[in-house]
Each structure stands twice: as C-alpha cells, then as structure tokens.
Image (cartoon, rainbow, N blue to C red):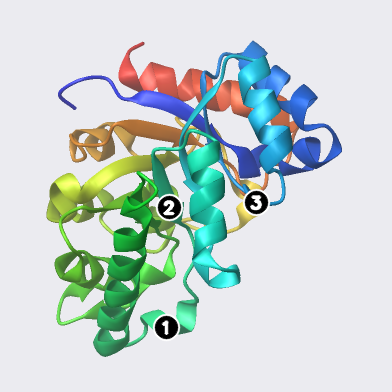
Amino acid sequence: MTSAPAIALQLYTIREAVAEDAGAALARAAEIGFEQIELFNIVEWRAQLEAGLAAHGLTAPTAHAVLSSGEPEQFFEAAQALGVKTLIDPFIAPERWTSRDEVLRIADELAAHAEKAKAYGLAFGYHNHFWEVENVFDGETALEVLAGALPADVGLEVDAYWAAVGGADVPALLTSLGDRVRQLHIKDAPLVDGALSKDREDQLPAGQGAIAWQPVLAAAPAAELLVVEFDEYRGDIFDGIAQGLAGTRALLGA
C-alpha cells in the first residue's frame, strides 16, 4: 500500500454490548485503541450512536445498511447525521448471484442507490460474502462481473476472509478489482481438514489463522480503511477485538 490505511472496528462485532449500553460499548472500543468505527443498525441506534461517538472522540467513516430492508432514504439520512462518508450495502441475497444477467441487474440497482446517495453527500459501496466469489461465469467471479458493470464512483469493500473461504485467490481477485477496492475487512480463519474453515465460530484475529495477509494487503493499494470484524467469536469479544487491532497493526508494521 502506498500509505498506511486507517483501522476501524465494525460495530456488528460488538452488537450485543451495544444493544445493552451503546455508550459503554463504544467507550471500551475507544479504550482498546480504536479511533474509527464502521457503523451498523444506524436507523434504530441513531441517537445512541451519535451521542456515543461524540462522547468518546470516535468518528465513523463508513456504515453498513442493507438497503433492501427499508426505505433507502432513511439510511442515507441517518448516515449523513452520523458523519458517515461512505454507506456500504453488506448483503444481497445469495440466490441473486447465480446468473450473469442477475448480477448485471444488481449493478444497476447499486448504481441507482449510489446516485441517490450523492444528494446526501455520501459515497456508496458494496460488501461481499462468499457467494459472490463462489459463483463464476466464464472465468470471472460474480464480484468481478459486478465491478465491471458498476460506475467508477461505486466502491467495493472486500471482505478478504469471506473471499478466501469462498475459494478465491484473494490477491489475484484484488488485483483484478483494482482501485475500486476502497476498504478491506480483516479477520482470519484456521485450516480444518486442509481447507479454510467457513464456520463463523472459528473466526480469528488477523495473523492467527492461515490467511497470508501480506500479499492481500499488497494487492489493495487503494484501500484506505482496514476494518476489524468478527461475525462470531469464541472468546471474550472485547479481548478478540483488542487482538484483532494488534494483529492488524502488526500487519501494517505500526
């Protein structure tokens, strides 16, 4: 990477603690060393998040919102109020990624969302799971087909873990996607029976599993944000994010 990217925590990782006491959860994240948070559930938790971010000196450069789950405008309004710069849709149903034509329709939908987001001063992007790389058309993953059909200003937040467990050569994928990759999600996976585990419960802090991270980071020079995240974690979640932050910093040589 040409310059060291920032590191953020995906709020979904500590969702149970946030639901119980958002201010206390954000305080703990700040104490651990996070300065930036990638938000989630921004409509329901808008007031608590706005207060918690301000109270603990945190900023939110990005946020996740599944636009199909409600009126897109409510997500744009909440993101704008929370100081978010880029709104990212993290989920489009797996069954929609099984044909090239449907992927092209998805690209049209995301392009329309991106155009609406501009009115709120927001950039827009998409976040992958494993099915976008498991589906391949004429040698191209569905994610690459999507990228080729999107306007240049629509970014991708590549979850390197999900791409890896989905079977992709992640550095090659990132190289193919080029400067459209604006953010990376960073979490690791162990080998189980010779393959990366897809079990969410097996997710590990960066550097503690079998993913080769240096080639991944080198292949995403335009990524400005690395996001520490676990879908699930077997141990104490705050200990996990502390290890995730330390591991990600170590990868960057920070």
Answer yes or no: is residue 215 visible.
Answer: yes
Chain-order first, disc 2 or disc 1: 2
The location of residue 27, given as percent across then percent down, is: 71, 18
146 or 63: nearer the viewer? 63
Nearer mark to the viewer, of 1 and 3: 3
The residue type indicated by label 1 comes to Arg
Label 2 and label 1: CA atoms lie apart by 18 Å
The location of residue 129, given as percent across then percent down, is: 45, 61
| Residue located 35% across and 44% down the image | 121
Q: In the rendered image, which residue does mark 1 sit on? A: 96
Label 1 and label 3: CA atoms lie apart by 26 Å
Q: Secondary structure at mark 2?
A: strand
| Residue located 39% across and 48% down the image | 120
Chain-order first, disc 2 or disc 3: 3
Numbered label attached to residue 88: 2
Q: Secondary structure at mark 1?
A: helix
The residue type indicated by label 2 comes to Ile
Check the image and report above or below for 32 versus 120. Answer: above
196 or 74: nearer the viewer? 74
The location of residue 140, given as percent across then percent down, is: 18, 73
Looking at this view, name the residue that lies furthest to the front.
119
| Residue located 50% across and 64% down the image | 72
Q: In the rendered image, which residue does mark 3 sit on? A: 43
Chain-order first, disc 1 or disc 3: 3
